[in-house]
Amino acid sequence: MTDRLWTSTPTMGRRTLLSGAGAAGLALGWGGPAWGLSATPRQRIIIDNDLSGDPDGLFQLAHHLASPSCDVRLVVGSHLHDPEPFDHSATQADNAAAKAREIIALMKLPRRPKVLAGANKAPDFAHPAPTPATAAIIAEAMRDDTTLPLYYCAGAGLTELAMAWKLEPRIGKRLKLVWIGGPEHNELNPTLPVRTDPEYNLTIDAEAVRILFNQSDIEIWQIPRDAYRQMLISHAELRAGLAGAGRLGRYLTASLDRIIAMVAKAPPPHNMGIGETYILGDSPLVTATALQSSFEPDASSSAYVIKPTPMVDAKGFYTPNPGGRPMRVFTRIDTRLTFSDMFAKLTEAAAR
């Protein structure tokens, strides 16, 4: 059932709806140890991530692909910094797309999404030029054959979406950007020490961020640095949770092992141990979309505030903009729901 059902029948309460569904539920085998319950898509998803870098994006991609309420239409492999310790090459976006294809090949999916590489470096936005990735983004946003909402889930830089909006501004009203990135909003968490260092994902392509915050009309759901750093999980939890996930679990475990080894071999002063935890900072992309509540769909288990979209200055920090369009800023992420759901779904996927 679509969201339209809930809004168009305000007199139908949950109790009425559930009682009417009872017989159908029994016929389908709901209840008992094996429900036989399968969600249908409630939203379209475009995933954009730097999958050749920090492996948190690989976990997020696999989790999104395993979520039946999401129709993942497109995966865009995006670039990192130049230079970049995670990937020293000049083909970072191509490498990210290749990683996406590896994840997809390990999963038994009813439909495989299109995978495209974005730009391998930040472009000249003064002279926007279409690429296969930007063309695909625009085409999906401009579809008129579906009422499913479109979420653009970005776990790194924002190059491709900014270029797509420059080329076709009408997409601004036709999607929501869910972005892992940007520094803390100090007024929302005054107990935190104020940080003056720029945030990693914003610095991948600061001009793209300024275009989307300062110029575009795209609604933004932001998971800033202090929120995505909450996605802390121990190595022991990861290994136990992925033990039943077959080849995909081994692939994800190996991706983390490579980062641990890379840091250990780095030249001083970067050759430090990273401890026994890791931040799966891209996973809130799944929490905010696939794991919305059943009735009145929303990311209701996590905390957020609505505030005017600020401007982003040349140094990558916010300038208040009281007249800015409303944006959503997440302040707390439901880690329990996110990680438990991820391990359960990846284990189920391996059993198919």
Image (tube, rainbow, N blue to C red):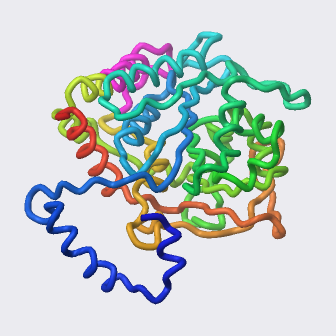
Quarter location, residue 111: top left
Range covered by the magenta-colored residues: 254-274
Q: Quadrant of the C terminus?
A: top left
| Foreground residue among 103 and 207 | 103
| Foreground residue among 34 and 202 | 34
| Foreground residue among 23 and 220 | 23
User: Residue at image x 25%, y 36%?
Assistant: 349
Image side of residue 266 versus residue 78, left or right: left
Image side of residue 337 versus residue 163, left or right: left
Residue 285 place in picture, x, y as percent:
49, 48
Image side of residue 76 versus residue 141, left or right: left
Quarter location, residue 155: top right
User: Residue at image x 37%, y 27%?
Assistant: 273
User: Residue at image x 51%, y 21%?
Assistant: 52
Quarter location, residue 204: top right
Residue 196 place in picture, x, y as percent:
68, 46
Q: Is residue 284 above or below residue 64?
A: below
Residue, far left:
32
| Foreground residue among 131 and 40 | 40
Residue 71 place in picture, x, y as percent:
47, 44
Residue 220 place in picture, x, y as percent:
66, 55
User: Residue at image x 84%, y 69%?
Assistant: 323
As for residue 256 lying within the magenta part, the answer is yes
As for residue 186 lying within the magenta part, the answer is no
